[in-house]
Image (cartoon, rainbow, N blue to C red):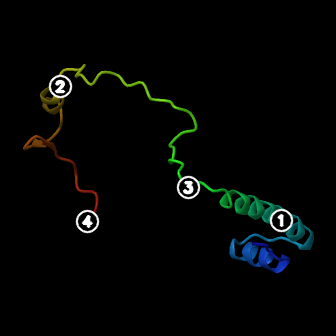
Amino acid sequence: MSLSPDDVKRIARLARIEIDDVQAQATQGQLNTIFDLIATMQAVDTSGIAPMAHAQEVTQRLRADIVTETDRHAAFQAVAPAVENDLYLVPKVIE
């Protein structure tokens, strides 16, 4: 896919970017280079290659899934201004 200067100006207008003819020519060259790279990558045969989540075989170290803090739910609700059915009551802010 190759863009013309008019295409670049139309895209810039849609993006609300003001560019002159010199900037449009420079941007056209850059965008066409990017599109050529994309076309080259799409031409590579990737059949039989499994998708990867990462370029290297890495795993994330995880901590043990154990409880490390005590339940302080009752203590927190004891100092709350208003509680009902184990829920904190707050003033209505939207009419």
Q: Amino acid at mark 2?
A: Arg
Query: Of the residues under marks 1 and 3, which one precedes in the sequence?
Result: 1
- Residue at 82% of width from left, 61% of height from top? 30
**Residue 72 — which label?**
2
User: Residue farthest to the right?
Assistant: 22
Q: For marks 2 and 1, give the CA distance.
A: 60 Å
Residue denoted by label 4: 95
Q: For marks 4 and 2, give the CA distance.
A: 33 Å
Q: Quadrant of residue 2?
A: bottom right
Is residue 49 shown above or below 24? above
Q: x, y percentage for residue 22?
A: 92, 69
Q: Nearer the viewer, mark 1 or mark 3?
A: 3
Query: Of the residues under marks 4 and 2, which one precedes in the sequence?
Result: 2
- Other residues around mark 2 within 10 Å, as few (<14) / some (14–19) / many (≥20): few
Q: Quadrant of the N terminus?
A: bottom right
Q: Amino acid at mark 3?
A: Ser
Q: Tell whether 11 sits left or right of 51.
A: right
Residue denoted by label 1: 27
Q: Quadrant of residue 43?
A: bottom right
Q: Are marks 2 and 1 in contact (CB under 8 Å)?
A: no
- Residue at 17% of width from left, 25% of height from top? 72
**Residue 47 — which label?**
3
- Other residues around mark 3 within 10 Å, as few (<14) / some (14–19) / many (≥20): few
Q: x, y percentage for residue 91?
A: 22, 51
Q: For marks 1 and 3, give the CA distance.
A: 34 Å
